[in-house]
Image: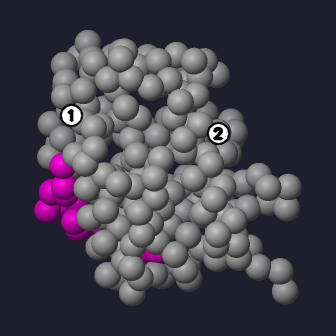
Amino acid sequence: METVTRLVLARHGQTPANVAHVLDTVLPGPGLTDLGRQQAEALGKELAAEAAVTHLYGSRARRAQETAGIVGSVLGLDAGTVEGVHEVQVGDLEGRSDEDAVGVFRAVYDGWRDGDLDARMPGGESGRDVLDRYLPAVAELADRHAGGTTVLVSHGAVLRLVGHALAGPSAVRPDGDDHLDNCGRLEFEAGPDGGWTLQAWRREAPGGLASTRDATGG
């Protein structure tokens, strides 16, 4: 019987920056709030009930490593670290939460989603920069763990962009809402042609532990 390679891309749990709606992307960044730790535990429990996870990783950010560590404690797995899958670097917008900054962030992201990958965060990354570092990391994980289910804990804005790149237009609801709550996740299966098929875009936080939407999650 042929084995299927599965990939789960999960957002980290809530952080103090998420609560304050701050654009916080520089590594290593903040850790989790109490709610964020609860979300991570709930994510681990849902994954344990739904899939036989074989490998677990997080980005280099503290919030991703803490989330992966809690998920791993539920699943009985150690969490590794993957380079290149950190959050979109927002450059001059870093540390801001004002309406103007969040508006610029959203306008650039919307441009990426509409196909303008050369649009750039002021002093930060373009959409092409992000995909050029992230997609090879996904491909490497798929090659390394063919036939298994790999969970990668990453970040809201970058996951939304990567989700569209891997899944295409089917990733968006008719109302255009592609948000990801903390510990929301995208689930993919690898196809025979090397592409990916979206199985689920789980926008809501696990266990009903939702927090207010923040700047990067949607």
Magenta segment's dominant SS is helix
Magenta stretch, residue numbers = 30-47
Question: Which percent across, then down, holds residue 28?
Answer: 25, 48
Quadrant in which residue 175 is drawn: top right
| Residue 22 higher or lower than 107, as above or below | below
Judge whether 176 appears above or below 64 on screen: above
Amino acid type, residue under disc 2 in the picture: Ala
**Mark 1, residues whose alpha carbon is within 10 Å: few (<14), some, or many (≥20)?**
many
Across and down, in percent, residue 92 comes to 28, 18
What residue did someone put label 1 on? 21
Mark 2 = which residue? 165
Q: Residue at x 32, y 81 (%)?
A: 73
Which residue is rendered at x = 46% and y = 48% of the image? 85
Query: As drawn, is 186 to the left or to the right of 168?
Result: left
- Name the quarter where the C terminus is drawn: top left
Relative to the observer, which residue lies in front, 107 or 24?
24
**Looking at the rendered structure, which numbered label has been put on residue 207?**
none
Q: Is residue 115 above or below residue 157?
A: above
In the rendered structure, which amino acid carries the disc numbered 1? His
Disc with the residue nearer the chain's start (1 vs 2): 1
Instruction: Answer yes or no: is residue 110 visible.
Output: no
Secondary structure found at label 1: loop
Residue at the (34%, 82%) spot, across then down? 74
Q: Check if residue 94 falls in the magenta segment.
A: no
Residue 51 visible in the current orientation: yes
